Each structure stands twice: as C-alpha cells, then as structure tokens.
Amino acid sequence: MVKNYLVVIITILTLSVFTLVIIQLTGISRNSWTRLLNGHKEGEEFNGNFYSKEGEIYHGEIFHEETKTRDQIVRRMAKTTLQFYETKYNFGSVPEGKVLSHTFRFKNTGQNPLMISKTDVTCGCTVPNYHLEPIAPGSDGEITIEFNTSGKSGIQQKNIAVHANTNPESVNIGIEADVR
C-alpha cells in the first residue's frame, strides 16, 4: 500500500518537472501566463499597447532591449527597501471612455539608492510612468498610473508589479474603478 502511494507521488513529481521543462523550452512567458490566468484565451487578440521611453508603440508581448539592459543594471545594485504610502486606489464610479490617472508615492526606506527596473501590468489599458533616475535613501519617488476605460464596463481591477533593487524584488500596487 505504501509503495503504491510512493509510486503515485514520484509519478506526479516527474510529470510536474517535465511540464515545467516543456513550458520553459516553448518560451511561454510570464506575461502569457498572466493573460491566460486573467481570462484571456490563447490566440485571442490582445488589445494591449506597450510604449518605449521615446513613445514608440509596441503591440503584443515585448521585452524591449533597453528594459532588458536596465533590468540587468538594477539586479547588480545593492538591495534597499521601499514603502508605498498606499498600495490600492479606487476611482469610484466613472464613465466609459475616460482616461484616469493616479500617482502612487513611495519612500526609499533603505540605506542604498533605489532604482525601478520595470513594471508588469495586467492589461495594456494600464500604463505606468516613473522616473528613471535612482532615488536616494530617505527620499520619495512616485509612479503615475494611467488607466484607459475605453471598451471597459463594470468593476475593473488592475494590478501593477513594481520591480526594483529591493527586498522583496517586486511590490504590487493596484487600481479599481466601476466603469459605467
């Protein structure tokens, strides 16, 4: 009886590892998984736009070379800590078609300069903007989130993962709106 359970557990673990290897080899990214987990179907048209610092618009999933280089620089920086003054903001009831904006303020609570490497968003309708320069220890910084309500209705919740040279490596902030 115990041997049967052991065989089942080893089989499950082997299949899990095999599945993870296949996922890694096929190049399915974290953004793809996030889209699938949020209800988007594979092959479904993605209406998200990604913007470079120069304002170029990219459609679909990208990892811009400049972002990749910045991420590598930030990973080599000494770790620090950051504290947001608020992590959630509710716009309340808003009309469809409006572009909403909210600024999240934070403080570098550590002993080393803080630099944001990138942000991950759950939808292309949500665009974060932040300063590229390092933030000195004890100083404040900010991230402004713009949310385009066009084509949206009902309760909308959007999450933004902020990646920096912090411990932990990312912090989540979010917005919510009831689009009418």
Image (tube, helix red, strand yellow):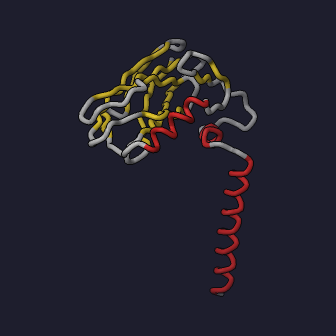
- Quarter of the image for residue 88 reads top left
Q: State the residue at coordinates (36%, 30%).
A: 134
| Relative image position of residue 72 (x, y in whole percent) | 51, 40
**144 w.r.t. 16: above or below:** above
Of 141 and 45, nearer the camera is 141
Q: Residue at x 27, y 36 (%)?
A: 137
User: Residue 57 lies in what quarter of the image?
Assistant: top right
Residue displayed at 59% across by 38% down: 38
Q: Nearer the viewer, residue 171 or 165?
A: 165
Residue 53 locus on image (x, y percent): 53, 20
* Residue at the farthest left position: 138
Residues 123 and 151: in front is: 123
Residue 68: x percent and y percent? 57, 35
**Residue 164: percent from left, percent from top:** 42, 38
Give the residue at x 50% y 34%.
70
User: For this view, does 91 lie left or right of residue 150?
Assistant: left
Q: Is residue 143 left or right of residue 41?
A: left
Choose top left, top right, bottom left or bottom right for residue 173.
Answer: top left
Please state the total of marks drawn on the protein image: 0
Position of the N terminus, as image quadrant, is bottom right
Image height of 21 relative to 71, above or below: below
